[in-house]
Image: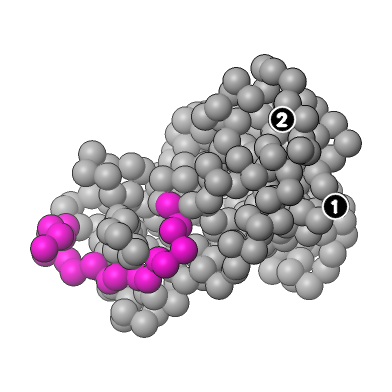
């Protein structure tokens, strides 16, 4: 029998289509999950701490904080969080006619686009500017430790919620000094003030178009197209977003200088995540001439 943490019983979530925790939680879309020596993942989602691990065609989820939710609530939460209601096999099928995209989709087929809290996604991607994943994770952790609420968890460790915009809005740049986020501090505070005051209604963006949503988010100091698209893709599930970081910029310039094929554009956010993961682990793909179609 699988050993549980501190005697806590895990809930088995069906995973027939091969969601990969490693690919999904370590592909640059979230920064609050930590790989453990035993291969499990521990992190904060919402206001709870969880341990996750894969076992055959299941994801075993254990809530490490009290009170733990009922099993049906836990199952519903992760069904939504891991976007298990979306048909990723069909999305992967859209890539079949394009050699590089087919290779990328096969290599990255365990990735799912998380349905994260929209404010957390916006804030973390503001912090992501000109940073790598390790440094972003450190910034996010320090922001939570200093301004989030404590979450006592199993085995005596305390985690922290992601701070609400209302908690950050009254602060000054000097208050954020312990986070060590530099020039990003004023951007975080401007975002917090606008979201807390409802000048920007993040939840309401689900009902408007991606271009309209981008225009609104880019009204925040320091938020450009890349941060806006990341916030919309990973926080509001606008799957047509195509954020361009350094890796994706190189990949698009080299492999798709005229843009993605038309048929994948409605799901460009998923496809770019496949491509990001693929070239991150296979950088040689960008060093030789390889036509995008075959």
Q: Quadrant of residue 154?
A: bottom left
Can residue 11 be spotted in the picture?
yes
Work out whether residue 72 or residue 280 is closer to the camera in this orientation and state it. 280
Residue 94 colored magenta?
no
Secondary structure of the residue carrying tag 1 is helix
Secondary structure of the residue carrying tag 2 is helix
Q: Quadrant of residue 225?
A: top right
The image position of residue 214, as x and y in percent, is: 82, 53
Chain-order first, disc 2 or disc 1? 2
The image position of residue 3, as x and y in percent, is: 13, 58
Residue at 70% x, 33% y is 248
The image position of residue 148, as x and y in percent, is: 44, 52
- Numbered circle sitting on residue 184: none
Total labels: the figure holds 2
**Which residues lie in the magenta part?**
1-20
Residue at 67% x, 17% y is 287
Q: Most extreme residue toward the top, as rendered? A: 287
Residue 5 colored magenta?
yes
Work out whether residue 1 or residue 6 is closer to the camera in this orientation and state it. 1
Mark 2, residue position: 251
Q: Is residue 171 left or right of residue 53?
A: right
Observer-side mark, 2 or 1, equals 1
Q: Which quarter of the image is occupied by the C terminus?
A: top right
The answer to whether the residues at label 2 and label 1 have Cβ atoms under 8 Å apart is no
- Numbered circle sitting on residue 262: 1
The image position of residue 89, as x and y in percent, is: 59, 62
């Amino acid at each position: 029998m699988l050993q549980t943490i501190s005697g806590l019983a895990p809930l088995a979530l069906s995973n027939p289509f091969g969601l990969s925790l490693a690919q999904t939680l370590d592909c640059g879309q979230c920064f609050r999950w930590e790989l453990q020596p035993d291969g499990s993942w521990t992190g904060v989602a919402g206001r709870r701490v969880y341990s996750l691990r894969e076992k055959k065609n299941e994801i075993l989820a254990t809530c490490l904080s009290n009170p733990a939710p009922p099993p049906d609530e836990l199952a519903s939460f992760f069904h939504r969080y891991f976007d298990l209601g979306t048909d990723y096999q069909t999305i992967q099928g859209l890539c079949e006619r394009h050699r590089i995209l087919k290779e990328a989709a096969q290599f990255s087929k365990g990735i799912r686009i998380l349905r994260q809290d929209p404010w957390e996604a916006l804030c973390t991607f503001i912090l992501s500017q000109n940073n790598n994943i390790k440094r972003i994770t450190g910034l996010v952790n320090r922001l939570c430790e200093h301004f989030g609420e404590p979450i006592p968890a199993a085995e005596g460790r305390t985690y922290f919620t992601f701070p609400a915009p209302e908690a950050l809005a009254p602060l000054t740049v000097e208050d954020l000094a312990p986070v060590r986020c530099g020039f990003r501090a004023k951007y975080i505070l401007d975002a917090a003030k606008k979201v807390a005051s409802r000048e920007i209604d993040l939840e309401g963006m689900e009902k408007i178009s991606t271009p309209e949503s981008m225009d609104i988010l880019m009204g925040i100091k320091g938020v450009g197209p890349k941060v806006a698209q990341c916030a919309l893709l990973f926080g509001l599930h606008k799957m047509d977003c195509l954020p361009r970081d350094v890796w994706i910029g190189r990949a698009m310039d080299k492999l798709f200088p005229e843009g993605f094929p038309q048929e994948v554009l409605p799901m460009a956010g998923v496809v770019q995540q496949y491509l990001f993961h693929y070239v991150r682990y296979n950088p040689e793909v960008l060093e030789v001439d390889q036509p995008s179609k075959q």
